[in-house]
Amino acid sequence: MAAKENIILTGFSGTGKSAVGALAARTLGWEFVDTDAEIVKRAGKSVTKIFAQEGEVVFRRMEGEEVRRACGGTRRVIATGGGALMDEGNREVCFGSGLVVGLEASPETIYKRLSAQGGGRNPEERPMLASREPLKRIRELKAQRQPYYSMAHWTVSTDYLTEAQAAAEVARAWQTVGGRMMGGASSDSEVAAVVTHSTGSYPIVVGWGLLERLGERLLGIGIKGPVYIISDSNVFPLYGRQAQRSLQKAGIVAHAFVIPAGEENKSLAMAQNIYEWLASRRAERRHAILAVGGGVVGDLAGFVASTYLRGMPFVQVPTSMAAMVDASIGGKVAVNMPQAKNLVGAFYQPQMVLADPQALTTLGKRELAEGWCEAIKHGFILDAGLVDVFEEHAEALMALERDISTQVIRRSMAIKAQIVSEDERETLGRRILLNYGHTMGHALEATTSYGKYLHGEGVSVGMMGAARISHRMGMIGDDVINRQERLLRRFNLPTKVEAVDSEGLFKAMALDKKTEGGAIRWVLLEGVGRAVSRRDVPGEVVEEVVRGLGR
């Protein structure tokens, strides 16, 4: 069934759904509907009184009725209650009725807004403020709901935006991806986000067990084969064969090239081997390359796709956590040189990213943890609420519990999708924030010949280094450093190294791609969920922090 022209706003109380929704509706020339306001109008009493006098069960029934009523129309901006998406029926209605946009804000911002009674709302509509520890209560309740907010097709962080600016971002979300979701795509709950770029767009599809339907998904985006699968010796027996069977079941001819596992094989020499194989198979420009594996396979296969025959379509099927939440999204493809990682590469966008979290069940705990590091990074730089979720559910995430893990992966992938859509080639200063922890992390990997530390482990140490630089620059306090360190340790990630090759690290950092005019562009923290880039970090501060990385 074709999707309606609707925008459904979700998010915690205080993120601005009512005010922003009304402004966005005015911008688009649409109708605005606030489901909580409609409930109050029909019941003749406040939401708080409904809860107190009739109970939550009655309220949720009324809420479901209003959600269905609102979503039954079209060309509407619909503000839903903070807990509406927790109900499966409401989720089905909302995702089947248009573009779901999440409004995000940190617990601190929410507390300030609710305390100020923003928008003239009656004080009795702010029951969380009656708690003895209102900020703690906001943190706890928001963490419980965050997995459902993370399902949104698009997220707007409102901490530093005016209501008008946030409304403009909501309208831009519709103009960017809403139209592409018409014709039924918006009812596809497995689409976590859509990346837009200079020449088009592509979906990020996430779902448990999705690899079995890979062939159907490729046909859905117009890839009919032949397809050339590139995988490695660890992944291919587990998931490369599964991908090949799924393609063959869909009538797609699929060939496979398996590289030895290991970072050292992400090289020009290995790319040459694949070029020769493609030539022997008489690969054509209209054929497609399918990367099935972790970041090494994705980078290498993407590099080959970007250069062979001046460019072939390719699809990312990440099977590691780090590749899912980071490396597979954004079109950065590259091979390594002896001097540093990713020195030779390009920006080349895939046709689709398909992530099946079930593939992570065969990972060891170390590999799983290093992948979660990239998602934790997303929280510290852009989404304080995601940090709350990690703190609340650390053990469940390390156990890869299906529902919470899938939703956190979706949320993290959506964050990266939004950032790379805004700054495709890292020219506007936005995308560089994703490199938090990577300057020192990449240098640590290079100085240990890419053999001692996994990528996420290097990033973990680099995040602690960047946080300590932030502290010495007077940007954050000890509380932020300690909070980050505690969380990383809960995932068994290193925060220090056994021995520091200071000179080697300095040389490797000098080759960092973020260096401009001899000065490194450091990504630093101003707080949890707030990152900035700085070029004015004194050399002595860097030296002090680097030398302090050792145990």
Image (cartoon, rainbow, N blue to C red):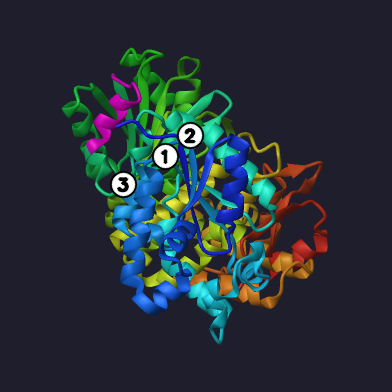
Q: Rounded to the nearest whole Å, what is the CA distance between mark 3 and mark 2?
A: 21 Å
Q: Nearer the viewer, mark 3 or mark 2?
A: 2
Q: Is residue 409 above or below residue 154?
A: below
* Rendered location of residue 12, percent (x, y): 51, 62
Mark sitting earlier along the chain (3/1)? 1
Q: Is residue 38 above or below residue 344?
A: below
Secondary structure beneath dot 3 equals loop
Mark sitting earlier along the chain (3/2)? 2
The segment highlighted magenta reads: 213-225
Label 3 Cα crowd, 10 Å radius (few <14 / some 14-19 / many 20+): some
> On the rendered image, what quadrant is the N terminus found in?
top left
- For the residue pair 277 and 83, the one nearer the viewer reads as 83
Q: Is residue 491 above or below residue 151?
A: below
Q: Rounded to the nearest whole Å, what is the CA distance between mark 2 and mark 1?
A: 8 Å
214 within the magenta span: yes
Determine whether label 3 and label 1 are within 8 Å by CB: no
* Rendered location of residue 314, percent (x, y): 41, 27
Q: Label 1 sits on what residue type?
A: Gly
Name the chief secondary structure element in magenta: helix
The residue identified by callout 1 is 98
Secondary structure beneath dot 1 equals loop
* Rendered location of residue 357, percent (x, y): 32, 51
519 within the magenta span: no
Determine whether label 2 and label 1 are within 8 Å by CB: yes
Q: Label 2 sits on what residue type?
A: Gly
Evaluate whether residue 369 shows in this view: yes
> On the rendered image, what quadrant is the C terminus found in?
bottom right
Q: Rounded to the nearest whole Å, what is the CA distance between mark 3 and mark 1?
A: 20 Å
The residue identified by callout 2 is 178
Q: How many marks?
A: 3
Mark sitting earlier along the chain (2/1)? 1
